[in-house]
Amino acid sequence: MDHQLKGKIALITGSSSGIGWGIAQSLAAQGCDVIIHGVEALGLLENKAKELTEKFQIKAWPYRADLSHADEIETFFAELEMKKILPDILVNNAGVQHVAPIEEFALAKWQLLLSLHLTAPFLLTQKLLPAMKHKKWGRIINIASVHGLVASVQKSAYVAAKHGLIGLTKTTALETAKSGVTCNAICPGWVKTPLVEAQIGEKARQQGLSFEQATEKLLGEKQPSEKFIEVSQLGDLVVFLSSESASGMTGSALTMDGGWTAQ
């Protein structure tokens, strides 16, 4: 282990489970200090931070904030600034899902998904860019989705937000191109997370299938590899994008989707 990110601090939103937790572990394994964020009880987040500290001998700080509310982002950032733990690496990962036809899609759900998937990354980027520019080094990595590049039915808000997130990624990259800061997006296909498992369960219920049958159908419809992407693989890609080897990459939307968008 070469600890190539020792001395850096990363904020991974939605890092209490799923993709975010996998990314947090990958960064910590490279010596990076991490801010664990979620909306669960603070005790759970503290346990997650303690687990990383003990396993990787790094610093980890737990924070609870609902990023769909701009005022909670303000409070969150103010506390980070006060404690002088402003991140060098920002991974915008937090997310939720809601599935419904457009004509049945509740406005509150639309606003929630856009707030969390698009407005929160914008606000966090806005808050953290000045310090990154001052240090002449920073990494902003937006966890988009294949749905930032292609669409699926009944996911209007998610698709719109993720397309917007890739647009934000490109604009951020252009505005920071000479600053030492890079901004890239990762576009995963199906990753086995609690979010996706919930979708499989719903598909099984609606279509009278077993969980295994629904899983096979889900993968077979979209992902030619018929295998889930592993969270550790996404974590490794985040580590690469955070490294000096990727300093010339900015404004990219990188797929890891088992061939989904090649079709």
Image (cartoon, rainbow, N blue to C red):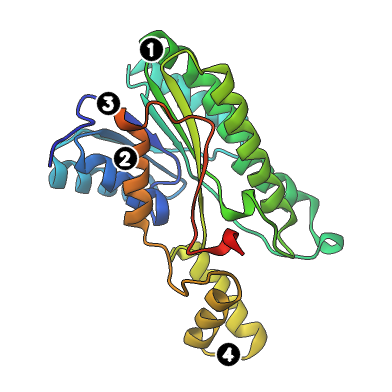
Q: What residue type is labelled 4?
A: Leu
Q: Disc 1 to disc 3, how far (Cα)?
A: 13 Å
Which disc number belongs to residue 8? 3
In terms of image quadrants, where is residue 191?
bottom left
Label 1 or label 3, whichever comes before in sequence order: 3
Quarter of the image where the C terminus is located: bottom right
Closest to the observer, 234 or 85: 234
Label 3 or label 4, whichever comes before in sequence order: 3
* Relative image position of residue 6 (x, y in whole percent): 19, 29
Relative vertical location of residue 247 with respect to residue 58 in this rendering, above or below: above
Q: Say whether marks 3 and 4 touch (CB < 8 Å).
A: no
- Please tell me whether mark 3 sits on a helix, a strand or a loop: loop
Residue 201 lies left or right of residue 138; in this view the side is right
Q: Disc 2 to disc 3, how far (Cα)?
A: 12 Å
Q: Which marked residue is nearer to the observer: mark 2 or mark 3?
A: 2
* Relative image position of residue 72 (x, y in whole percent): 55, 31
Which residue is painted at 26% across and 43% down in the image?
49
Q: Which marked residue is nearer to the observer: mark 1 or mark 3?
A: 1
Label 2 or label 3, whichever comes before in sequence order: 3
- Please tell me whether mark 4 sits on a helix, a strand or a loop: loop
Q: Say whether marks 2 and 4 touch (CB < 8 Å).
A: no
- Give the residue at mark 2: 239
Closest to the observer, 199 or 166: 166
* Relative image position of residue 172 (x, y in whole percent): 57, 24
Q: Counting other residues with Cα less than 10 Å from the Cα at mark 4, is it few (<14), some (14-19), or many (20 or more)?
A: some
- Give the residue at mark 1: 136
- Give the residue at mark 4: 209
How many dots with numbers? Answer: 4
Quarter of the image where the N terminus is located: top left
Which residue is painted at 74% across and 64% down in the image?
154
